[in-house]
């Protein structure tokens, strides 16, 4: 299991200086402490309190531009995977950089539309689209629906026929390739729930071509997330190219291959998957095939651009435990996947000096509420602040209000400007839509 690295990894932890050096959007200043783009993060924590998410707009824009440049000449369209970070401002800025959207629910579809992304620039993926979602996708005029089963193909055909439209569909094939990533986020093996078994795809494609209301335009695949080497991509894309040839030999028209997402980022001080290497894998498989390509990256575009700022509430257990005011309800990745997230102090004075190995935990009543175990961290004390890095993808979107903890606010930095893009959710917000029915005894003591 290559990654995400387990949180109690035996590899030595990178130093604060190495972590910052590996992230060009971050810098440590003697007076201002940790700075994202040109904004000292302590200013945001002072204004909004902690925990608070901070995203770097310039960083996201720059990453999209870098990926687009690496893919130049390949006839590729980037459809940002909305699930990674679905904030309207994030969607708007990525759309401004030329990205469409990959959505997996009616909620994501409506978010993308609300952010100003045209229906034709939206791909609707997902293994269990409901009738209502299919109808909404068709009414929004989405550019493509990625079909995951024969049953879903029939649903789309019926819905499109009833609406009098033709749905452009791609069949999501399961290439049965191991992405070498965490078991909970690998999707391209035969025993995962995703896609159409490779050996069934050609017959289903022919069936699709015979159905009313649908036009098969190509194939799609997505083998997993946080992939750090091109080997699984090369294996899967070779299978996809083979499928294109097979389908064409059978007389089918195949003009699109949606190559999915999954590009991994460096959570420590090592780089993620270089976009040029990814582009090489695309070129090797599809270079001569005359197909229009799509990619659906999420994490790679937004992950490094987001941080979760937290304050140290106290230390305990002979300073073995550093208890933060952020918790697993805010960022669940360490608890859910044993994921490694680097943690650095906000104040420059805290970033130097001898390190101690500590468990960095949240206040939620579960032992799993642990951000890092045995982590080398320079000394911190109650009231000091830290930043949990690389939290821009699968961070705020996966938050819950467990333990009646409201969702943390979000600030967006852009160069030297910043703005609040979501306020803190207060306790009253949590029960605003709850009601107590009459049959519940009314005479409780208040
Ligand atoms: N396309 C499809 C069909 C997907 O299912 C996904 C992610 C993506 C694209 C984008 O993948 P990315 O480029 O972001 O790796 N919550 C987990 C990750 C789950 C990914 C699910 N599918 C985590 O925090 O690591």
Image (cartoon, rainbow, N blue to C red):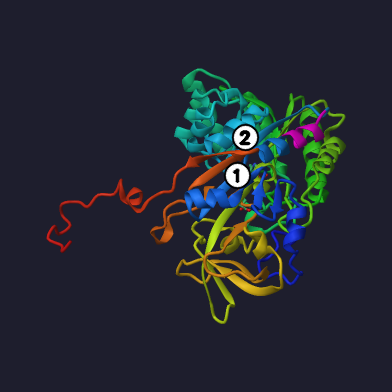
Quadrant including the N terminus: bottom right
Magenta-drawn stretch contains 71: yes
Reading the image, the residue beneath label 1 is 55
Bin the neighbour count of mark 2 within 10 Å (Cα to Cα): few under 14, some 14-19, many 20 and up. many
Res. 136 mark: none
Quadrant including the C terminus: bottom left
Image x and y of residue 141, in percent:
55, 22
> Is any part of residue 341 visible from this angle?
no
Q: Is residue 262 above or below residue 267?
A: above
Name the residue at 15% across, 52% down.
438
Name the residue at 83% across, 40% down.
276
Image x and y of residue 199, in percent:
72, 43
Reading the image, the residue beneath label 2 is 146
Q: What SS does tag 2 mark?
A: strand
Bin the neighbour count of mark 1 within 10 Å (Cα to Cα): few under 14, some 14-19, many 20 and up. many
Magenta-drawn stretch contains 5: no
Image x and y of residue 318, in percent:
57, 82
Q: Is residue 74 above or below residue 310?
A: above
Name the residue at 69% across, 38% down.
201
Q: Quadrant of residue 411?
A: top right
């Amino acid at each position: 299991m290559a990654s995400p690295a387990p949180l109690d990894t035996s590899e030595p932890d990178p130093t604060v200086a190495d972590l910052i050096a590996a992230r060009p959007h971050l810098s440590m200043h003697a007076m201002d402490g940790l700075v994202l783009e040109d904004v000292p993060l302590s200013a945001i924590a002072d204004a909004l309190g902690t925990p608070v998410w901070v995203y770097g707009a310039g960083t996201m824009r720059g990453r999209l531009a870098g990926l687009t440049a690496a893919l130049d000449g390949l006839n590729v369209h980037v459809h940002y995977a909305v699930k990674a970070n679905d904030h309207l401002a994030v969607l708007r800025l990525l759309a401004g950089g030329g990205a469409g959207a990959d959505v997996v629910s009616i909620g994501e579809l409506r978010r993308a539309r609300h952010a100003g992304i045209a229906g034709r620039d939206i791909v609707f993926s997902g293994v269990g689209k409901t009738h209502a979602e299919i109808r909404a996708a068709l009414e929004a005029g989405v550019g493509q629906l990625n079909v995951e089963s024969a049953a879903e193909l029939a649903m789309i055909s019926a819905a499109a026929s009833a609406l009098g439209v033709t749905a452009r569909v791609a069949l999501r094939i399961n290439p049965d390739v191991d992405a070498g990533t965490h078991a909970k986020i690998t999707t391209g093996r035969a025993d995962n729930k995703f896609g159409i078994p490779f050996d069934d795809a050609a017959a289903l494609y022919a069936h699709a071509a015979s159905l009313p209301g649908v036009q098969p335009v190509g194939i799609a695949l997505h083998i997993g997330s946080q992939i750090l080497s091109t080997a699984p991509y090369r294996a899967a894309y070779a299978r996809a190219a083979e499928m294109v040839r097979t389908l064409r030999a059978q007389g089918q028209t195949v003009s699109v291959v949606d190559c999915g997402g999954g590009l991994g980022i460096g959570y420590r001080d090592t780089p993620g998957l270089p976009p040029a290497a990814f582009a090489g894998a695309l070129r090797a498989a599809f270079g001569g095939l005359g197909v229009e390509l799509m990619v659906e990256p999420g994490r790679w575009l937004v992950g490094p651009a987001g941080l979760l700022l937290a304050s140290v509430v106290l230390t305990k257990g002979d300073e073995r435990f550093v208890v933060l005011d952020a918790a697993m309800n805010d960022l669940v990745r360490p608890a859910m996947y044993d994921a490694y997230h680097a943690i650095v102090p906000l104040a420059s004075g805290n970033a130097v000096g001898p390190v101690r190995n500590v468990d960095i935990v949240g206040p939620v009543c579960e032992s799993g509420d642990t951000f890092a175990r045995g982590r080398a961290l320079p000394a911190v004390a109650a009231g000091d602040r830290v930043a949990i890095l690389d939290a821009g993808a699968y961070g705020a979107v996966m938050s819950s209000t467990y333990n009646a903890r409201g969702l943390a606010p979000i600030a967006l930095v852009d160069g030297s400007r910043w703005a609040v893009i979501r306020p803190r959710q207060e306790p009253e917000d949590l029960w605003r839509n709850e009601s107590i029915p009459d049959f519940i005894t009314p005479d409780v003591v208040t």
